[in-house]
Amino acid sequence: MAVNPWISVILGFVITAFGCSMIVLVPETLHLRPSASGTLVKTTPAERDLSPSRKSDDSRSYFEAMKLRLLDGLSNLKSATEVLQSPPIILLLLTFLAHPFGTTTFDLSLRYISKRFHWKLREVAFLLSLLTFVNLVLVAALIPLFSNILIQHLKFSSKRKDLFLARASIVVLLLGALLVACSGTVGLTIFGLIVWTLGAGTSSFTRSLITTLVDQQHVGRLYAAISILETLGALIAGPSMNALYSIGLKKGGSWIGLPFYCMAVIFLLTGVGVWLFGVLTKKQWRLQEVPLGDEYGDDYADAHTIGDLVVTEPNHADEGRIRI
């Protein structure tokens, strides 16, 4: 941008197009079916043509097939809404509304620095390289390091690890937003943006947590709901945050940090939601992690697995239980 702003714009389009073109290399998995051993094998075109759904579509008229597809779609919609009725899922879904607000406000920080500290935009743009480097260190080093410490040394389960890191990331985001909002110097503002960047893993951790709450066949619907909420949040975040920034510019002084104060409040509400999620699911996770012998005592310590059933064999001949 110091030479010509069109250089960065054109490079951005070219690199984005190249990245999107990599989608063609993602393999199709709809034609795979589970084998008897549990692995996925490729179905032949003949098998797909002879599938019950294919034969039924060929044997019915067009309108009958459309009617069946409509009823099937309504059934899927009903089952999808049933999945979203769980309070823990709703709490985590609401946190995804905050992510577009964070992205919009973070992008706004470049104009904020330029206006408040009288930097040229091309000079402020160099901060993106610094923040991108911090993000790279976070993803490549810090998150794997802390994950390894929590799992290997502190013996956290995968779910507890994700919950802990999600909570920590939200606290970091809150601190970063407050530092940017309250800072009176450009150095403290840049430090606040660096702290803010260190909380960038929140979305990944919450997505990992919410995926564990639904069955595998409902994951696609869950991700669709997340995408809808993020899109809805983006539609609201852009006008609202820019309006707050305009109000701050008119009032002047510390009011110019109004969008960042608002963002701190949003991060605070998001943190409350994640903490409540942990409280609601704590008992459920504890039951899942209790060893069979500890839960039923020594009389039911002997067990073997049949399919999805854990059959306990008591020491007394006249008693027996099946734990599903």
Image: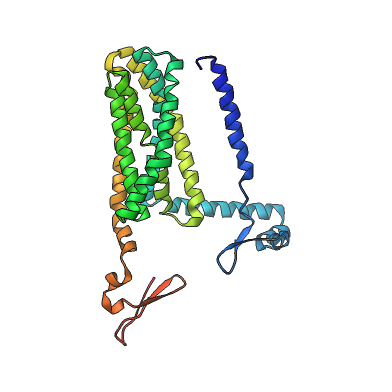
The answer to whether residue 1 is visible is yes
Residue at 30 percent across and 50 percent down: it is: 278
| Residue 166 found in image quarter | top left
- Whole-percent x and y of residue 249? 34, 14
Judged left or right of residue 81, residue 169 is left
Look at the image and tell me whether residue 94 can be seen: no
Colour option used: rainbow
Q: Nearer the viewer, residue 132 or 312?
A: 132
Q: Name the spot of residue 13 as percent of width and height, x first.
A: 58, 27
Q: Is residue 54 above or below residue 317?
A: above
User: Where residue 173 sits: x, y (%)?
Assistant: 33, 34
Which residue sits at x=32%, y=26%? Answer: 191
* Residue at the far bottom in the pictured view: 317
Using the rendered view, name the quadrant where residue 118 is placed: top left
Residue at the (46%, 57%) spot, across then down: 215
Q: Which of 292 and 189 is in front in this view?
A: 189
**Which image quarter holds the C terminus?**
bottom left
Q: Considering only vertical position in the picture, is 168 above or below 44?
A: above
**Left or right placement of residue 20 versus residue 284 in this view:** right
| Numbered circles on residues, count | 0
190 and 321: which is toward the camera:
190
Q: Nearer the viewer, residue 314 or 247?
A: 314
Residue 9 in the image: x percent, y percent? 56, 22
